[in-house]
Image (tube, rainbow, N blue to C red):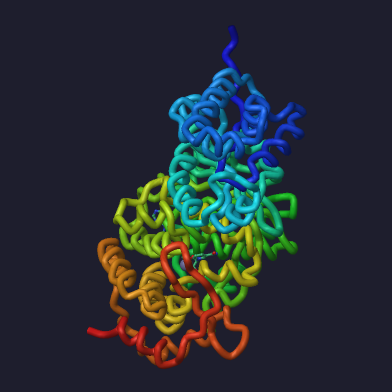
Amino acid sequence: MAALKPALVFIGFMGAGKTRAAREAAAALGVPADDADALLEAKLGEPIAAHFDREGEAAFRATEEELCGKLLENADGGVIALGGGALQSERVRAALARHVVALVDVDLDTAWERARDSGRPLARDRAAFEALYRDRAPVYEQAADAIIIGGGRGALDALLHIPEGHLLIWTRAASGAYPVWIGPIDRAPLPEQGRRLLVTDETVAALHAARVPGSAGIIEIPPGEQHKTLETAERVWSALAAQGATRADHVVALGGGVVGDLAGFCAATYQRGIGIVHVPTTLVAQVDSAYGGKTGVDLPEGKNYVGAYHQPTAVLTDPAFLATLPPEEFAAGYAEVLKTALIAGGTLWDRVSAGDAIDDAMIAGCVRTKLRVVANDERDAGARQILNLGHTIGHAIETTTGYARYRHGEAVGLGLLAALRLSGQDALRDLALDLLVHAGLPTHLDGAEPQAVAAATARDKKRTGEAVPFVLVDAPGRVTPGHTVGASELLAAVRELCAP
Ligand code: NAD
Ligand code: ZN
């Protein structure tokens, strides 16, 4: 007997949209979709909620396990949507192993909005719903070969070609959808799109340029934030022109956030826009800067003052690149991990706050958090601003110290401490301080006058009127933008960073 073919199985929490994702995928493949909940209701002869209420959860789970277990064990190709609770069964989890498992992402508030009025038995009480959401999250993550954020349209081809050892994160924002591949670069699917022009910095070129095959040309820039300028951009534009690059070709940015931001900006503007693929090689870039489509360069007047939104064609994230990263650069990335974990709450926060070492799952958690925020607000109209937690003061520190004294991540670490104080989160600030120290990051601000730093926040790009809006923290997982902070409070929070 020939081996059974893997099925494409959609999993996720209540209200994630698994049924719809399965239906869309099945339609594209020209096969029917099996919806486990619908099959269960047919078998029970009544709605799940009615059975659940009368017979209790344990009886329902036993029936569910039997049906889903069989469905998965016997599946020969095809598309399946599983109910949100099916993965509680070990039999179901084991049966999933041979299939392609796509986790349809949904945030807690959206899930609650969708599920509360649906009559689902486990969506009647918000606190219980929230606890269930938290409990199940790691189970889903563990099982997933792919995570779908913002809807799965267009993801099918990627879902059917996930290389061994890779996690696919498929994301959709206003201006387009793209895959993020987390895993070994050698097996990652580099997009084919005309000629491949590699932009990298001199340090990364020597270490890793050979890992990106098939480049028609390599454009090297000097490393460091001080080179994220229009002058360097002009050199890259000219080099692209000299190589005869056209809009049919694409740029691959191999490097940290400086290369990514600058190459992305050059790709956004060269001939009014050519494709960009990011291959991030620093922790900052792997957890943050390579995703979301913000590109740009600095002016002496302010950081990232000139730029454009330009979503990548794909992002290839190989954590193995980090092996050559100097410890100070790794530490700088840790500040962005801490920021992202504060925004995410949940499992990511649990792991980061416990002081766990950074691993692939943690990187994936950061990527997922950022992309979820961007999917809701690509152009920074509101919600995306939470990603700027710690950055208002962080950027002011960078500007005031001429981009030379602190790495971006180091400045963000200091900015996070100030933001937690301004949030009135004294205990969280203490914890963050410990984590930053442990990561080898500075927690003391030298070489800048507090007044100058406070004044520099007023030049922040996020400012739209008189006051600079601050991102503040209520609790891990509850971070909100648009807060007004008094001048004296702000100055005190910066002064505290400079105190001996
Ligand atoms: P970076 O790009 O300057 O890299 C840091 C240093 O590490 C450089 O000297 C580089 O040559 C070296 N390096 C890179 N990869 C290496 C590797 N694998 N092994 C050894 N050395 C390696 O800095 P960064 O911290 O990656 O990025 C900071 C920049 O990212 C800032 O300009 C910041 O504004 C930007 N950023 C952008 C976004 C965004 O959304 N676009 C988000 C966060 C940060
Ligand atoms: Zn940052």
Q: Is residue 463 visible?
A: yes
The single residue placed furthest to the front in the displayed view is 54
Residue at 57% from the left image edge and 58% from the top image edge: 109
Position of residue 368 measured from the top left corner of the image (x, y, whole percent): 52, 52
Position of residue 216 measured from the top left corner of the image (x, y, whole percent): 62, 46
Residue at 76% from the left image edge and 33% from the top image edge: 27
The single residue placed furthest to the left in the displayed view is 500
Q: Where 444 sits versus 220, above or below?
A: below
For this rendering, which residue is in front, 157 or 214?
157
User: Which quarter of the figure has residue 451?
Assistant: bottom left
For this rendering, which residue is in front, 120 or 425?
120
Quadrant for the N terminus in the image: top right
Position of residue 15 measured from the top left corner of the image (x, y, whole percent): 62, 48
For this rendering, which residue is in front, 484 or 66?
66
Q: Where 319 sits versus 488, above or below?
A: above
Position of residue 127 measured from the top left corner of the image (x, y, whole percent): 47, 56
For this rendering, which residue is in front, 139 or 148?
139
Residue at 36% from the left image edge and 58% from the top image edge: 330
Q: In the image, is 449 to the left or to the right of 114?
A: left
Residue at 22% from the left image edge and 84% from the top image edge: 500
Q: In the image, is 417 to the left or to the right of 239?
A: left
Q: Is residue 203 visible?
A: no
